[in-house]
Amino acid sequence: NGLRCAAAAWIACLAWAAPSLGAELRDIAFDAGDEPFELSADSVEYDRARDLYVADGSVEIRQGDRSLTADWMAFSNTTQRGVASGSVTFREGKEALVTSFAEFDIVTLQGVLFDARLEAATSQFRMSGAEIAKTGRETYRFEKGRFTTCRCEAGERDPWAIKAEHADLEVGGYGTARNTTFEVLGVPVAWLPWRAMTVSIATAM
């Protein structure tokens, strides 16, 4: 689809720039506004002309209690935007976003993850989406989201799930979902144009 094409273009463009990178580094500290962050990887290269960093192998950005890990990452120090691919995990407190490709802001570590899932250590819910945008400390926007408390084995069908075309959620608070479908064993049984949801970590939705 268009999003994947855009992601592939991002990676191709940055990978093309890699041969011209001059300085090879390993661990770098950045002054990013109020919260500086540290970057570490097996290999970090910097293109001074483009103000571009490309990191490869066990990549990690750490900023306070937030971190972003990936197999490969590139970001512009000028635009403060970047992409990450491979085994990508955004972690903040007890919450983690997991995907294979993400676009992010290097100052806030907020961004958009594609074909991703949201995990909370004490949550009963499994939450996933074609797109998940981290919009704040504990707030998320889902596109084509799926929500269930069922913990089935691989290949088994969930007894129930809620699907939403769009959803805005706050972990530990409330959320709203639009164009929602309630499914039982994969079969749609009810549709609502709008739905309010409780998404507290400690309680059911």
Image (cartoon, helix red, strand yellow):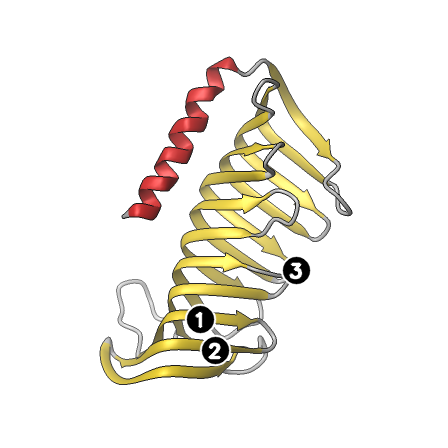
- The location of residue 75, given as percent across then percent down, is 55, 34
**Contact check, label 1 and label 2, Cβ < 8 Å:** yes
Of residue 104 and residue 171, the one placed in the foreground of this image is 104
Q: Who comes first in sequence, dot 3 or dot 1?
A: 3
Residue that label 3 marks = 93
Residue that label 2 marks = 176
Secondary-structure class at tag 1:
strand
Secondary-structure class at tag 2:
strand
Query: Amino acid type of disc 2?
Result: Thr
Crowd class of label 2 (few under 14; some 14 to 19; many from 20; radius 10 Å): some
Query: Amino acid type of disc 1?
Result: Ala
CA gap, disc 2 and disc 3: 23 Å
Asked if residue 141 lies left or right of residue 190, the reply is right
Residue that label 1 marks = 167
Q: Please tell me which residue is depicted at 57% across the width and 66% down the height of the picture.
A: 139
Secondary-structure class at tag 3:
loop
With respect to residue 117, does 42 lie above or below? above
